[in-house]
């Protein structure tokens, strides 16, 4: 079995979706959910999904070996970030080189970087009158929202869409593609790198 550790700081709807996707897999399992927030809703999800969960402060994650030790104890093969807002320290990025995936709710490099997460991203997309948005799945490096892009899916942003509407469309992309892309990458399968879910108008 290939073992995934999911890391999440907030609601965890992606984490839940990934757990459910692999629930009956014979090749991939979610070994744990790890959060830096003791009151994150993702921990309740872990409980009802019967996935072991762990909480560790940001200070412990970035300033000590505790996270590295935990990931090793869990025999983690891949680290999956799903709404995780701590910049992982170099020792983790080096140990899991190329095996830490993140999802970002925009078409990076647009609307990424420190402080750009969740609804703030969608608000910025609407304010910039973007015609398209989407998701980026990437292998992380030591900077926020950088590294190697492995997949993007795009949707059209209509002139009257507000941030909530864009969020809704982008979440749908996340739920559809993140588990599939994880599966393809982990199992070394080929897949299409860019998908346009709605045709983008030319004007
Ligand atoms: C997701 O939209 C994810 O793409 C985003 O946080 C949300 C978490 O939602 N991640 C980032 O913005 C990373 N920079 P969830 O907790 O319901 O899965």
Image: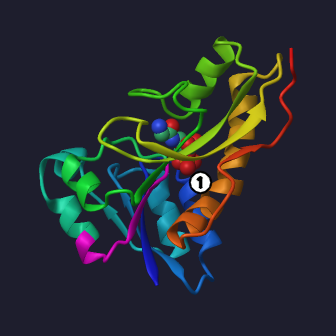
Q: Is residue 120 above or below residue 187?
A: above
Q: Position of residue 187 (x, y in %)?
A: 54, 73
Residue at 37% across / 71% down in the picture?
A: 77
**Element under disc 1:** helix
Task: Give the quadrant of residue 20.
Answer: bottom right
Per the image, the residue denoted by label 1 is 13
- Residue 17 shows up from this direction: no
- Residue 102 shows up from this direction: yes
* Residue 76 left/right relative to 172: left
Task: Give the quadrant of residue 34.
Answer: bottom left
Residue 79: say if magenta: yes
**View extreme (left): residue:** 64
Q: Position of residue 63 (x, y in %)?
A: 13, 47
Q: Position of residue 147 (x, y in %)?
A: 41, 41
Q: Please provide the residue range marked out in magenta.
A: 72-82
Residue at 31% across / 41% down in the picture?
A: 87
Quarter of the figure with the C terminus: top right
Task: Give the quadrant of residue 52.
Answer: bottom left
Residue at 74% across / 22% down in the picture?
A: 162
* Residue 158 left/right relative to 53: right
């Amino acid at each position: 079995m290939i073992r995934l550790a999911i890391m999440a700081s907030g609601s965890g709807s992606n984490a839940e979706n990934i757990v459910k996707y692999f629930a009956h897999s014979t090749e991939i399992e979610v070994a744990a959910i790890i959060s830096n927030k003791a009151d994150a809703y993702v921990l309740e999800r872990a409980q009802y999904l019967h996935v072991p969960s762990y909480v560790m402060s940001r200070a412990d994650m970035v300033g000590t070996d505790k996270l590295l030790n935990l990931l090793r104890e869990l025999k983690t093969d891949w680290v999956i970030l799903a709404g995780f807002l701590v910049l992982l320290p170099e020792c983790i990025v080096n140990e899991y080189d190329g095996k830490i995936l993140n999802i970002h709710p925009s078409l990076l490099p647009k609307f990424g970087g420190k402080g750009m997460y969740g609804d703030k991203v969608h608000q910025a997309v609407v304010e910039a009158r973007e015609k398209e948005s989407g998701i980026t799945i990437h292998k992380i490096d030591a900077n926020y929202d950088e590294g190697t892009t492995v997949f993007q899916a795009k949707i059209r942003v209509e002139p009257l869409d507000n941030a909530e509407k864009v969020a809704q469309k982008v979440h749908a992309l996340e739920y559809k593609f993140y588990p599939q892309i994880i599966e393809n990458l982990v199992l070394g399968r080929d897949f299409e790198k860019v998908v346009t879910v709605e045709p983008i108008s030319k004007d």
